């Protein structure tokens, strides 16, 4: 081979070398085409774990994904769907997947139920030919905490907390609502806080509420000694789980002020539209005399005192 041809061949190889290396790199970094969505042990979000199914058609893939969802996982820090979610049967009809659960499904607390739905829907919606998913309990369509039918769901039906950069120190300006000195109204306080990025904003809000106000003329509305069990935001609803300290009252702060201190503070976050409060996971309680904890509550600024005058809601 002549020197000119050898030189041309060498230059050609060098030209294609970056492409070859990039292709090799892409092959190494290629992610799984599918994911199984599990629930973290803190019961605050779903977590995707890459998975390559053996099944080659839609119905077999649904069966395979269901088997992975409804059994224990070896993934550290993650769990499958709750035991109460017992699937009796399923049917795929015109791109709509219908899942039929037995009556035990209704025994789940609200946070577990929404996380269960999110994990199941986000896993199964990946199957080719599945465009929407409906849940039934017995023969009746699933309803939410307000008794409204949930309807057809897709992956976009569930808005969860975005991932944060772990351990990064971040700054945030949060708006909190504390009780006034008399305990009959709410006073707004804006706090500038530094926090670790592995804490969600809703958890930050609740922790700051429990710590109490920084300024004068205000007091914590939540009973002293109350501890936060967990808090999560799913589908626009903030679920706050407090320990039994929440029920230990001295009645110095009025009932609605306690409730709306939590509701209004969380509703300042852009991803929270409503709030539900539970005690050790139990929402089948009535707080004091009239606040049903099984209900969800929206922002209400009628209790906010602006220099002696009541503000109306936004």
Image: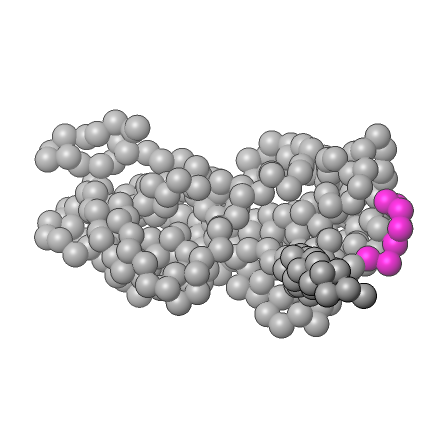
Q: In the picture shown, does residue 206 fall above or below 235?
A: below
Q: Nearer the viewer, residue 179 or 62?
A: 62
User: Is residue 236 among the parts visible in the rendering?
Assistant: yes
Q: Main secondary structure of the magenta part?
A: loop
- Quadrant of the image occupied by residue 291: top left
Image coordinates of residue 311 in percent, x first then y, are 21, 29
Image coordinates of residue 155 in percent, x first then y, are 64, 42
- Quadrant of the image occupied by residue 309: top left
Q: Nearer the viewer, residue 47 or 212?
A: 47
Query: Does residue 225 appear to the left or right of 308 in the view shown?
Result: right
- Residue at left 82%, top 57%? 53
**Is residue 24 located in the magenta-colored stretch of the structure?**
no
- Residue at left 21%, top 47%? 190
Quadrant in which the N terminus appears: bottom right
Q: In the picture shown, does residue 3 fall above or below 190?
A: below
- Residue at left 28%, top 34%? 301
Quadrant in which the C terminus appears: top left
Query: Does residue 199 appear to the left or right of 52 in the view shown?
Result: left
**Is residue 57 located in the magenta-colored stretch of the structure?**
yes
Image coordinates of residue 158 in percent, x first then y, are 58, 43
Query: Does residue 266 appear to the left or right of 36 in the view shown?
Result: left
Task: Give the magenta part as a residue range.
Answer: 53-59
Give the colouring mode of the picture: one colour
User: Is residue 292 among the parts visible in the rendering?
Assistant: no
Q: How many marks?
A: 0
- Residue at left 13%, top 53%? 215
């Amino acid at each position: 081979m002549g020197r000119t041809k050898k030189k041309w061949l060498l230059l050609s190889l060098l030209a294609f070398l970056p492409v070859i290396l990039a292709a090799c790199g892409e092959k190494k970094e290629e992610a799984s085409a599918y994911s199984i969505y599990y629930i973290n042990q803190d019961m605050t979000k779903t977590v995707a774990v890459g998975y390559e199914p053996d099944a080659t058609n839609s119905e077999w893939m649904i069966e395979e994904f269901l088997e992975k969802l409804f059994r224990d996982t070896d993934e550290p820090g993650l769990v499958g769907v709750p035991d109460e979610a017992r699937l009796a049967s399923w049917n795929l009809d015109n791109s709509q997947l219908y899942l039929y659960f037995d009556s035990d499904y209704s025994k789940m607390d609200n946070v577990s139920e929404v996380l269960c739905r999110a994990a199941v829907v986000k896993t199964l919606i990946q199957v080719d030919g599945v465009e929407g998913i409906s849940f039934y309990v017995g023969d009746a369509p699933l309803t939410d905490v307000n008794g409204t039918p949930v309807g057809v769901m897709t992956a976009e039906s569930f808005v969860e907390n975005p991932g944060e950069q772990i351990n990064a120190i971040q700054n945030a300006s949060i708006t909190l609502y504390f009780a006034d000195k008399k305990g009959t109204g709410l006073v707004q306080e804006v706090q500038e806080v530094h926090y670790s990025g592995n804490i969600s904003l809703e958890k930050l809000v609740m922790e700051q509420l429990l710590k109490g106000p920084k300024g004068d003329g205000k007091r914590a509305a939540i009973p002293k000694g109350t501890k936060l069990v967990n808090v999560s935001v799913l589908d626009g609803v903030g679920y706050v789980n407090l320990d039994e300290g929440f029920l230990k009252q001295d009645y110095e702060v009025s009932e609605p002020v306690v409730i709306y201190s939590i509701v209004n503070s969380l509703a300042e976050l852009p991803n929270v539209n409503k709030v539900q409060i539970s005690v050790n996971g139990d929402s089948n309680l009535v707080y004091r005399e009239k606040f049903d904890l099984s209900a969800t509550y929206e922002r209400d600024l009628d209790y906010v005192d602006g220099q002696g005058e009541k503000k109306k809601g936004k």
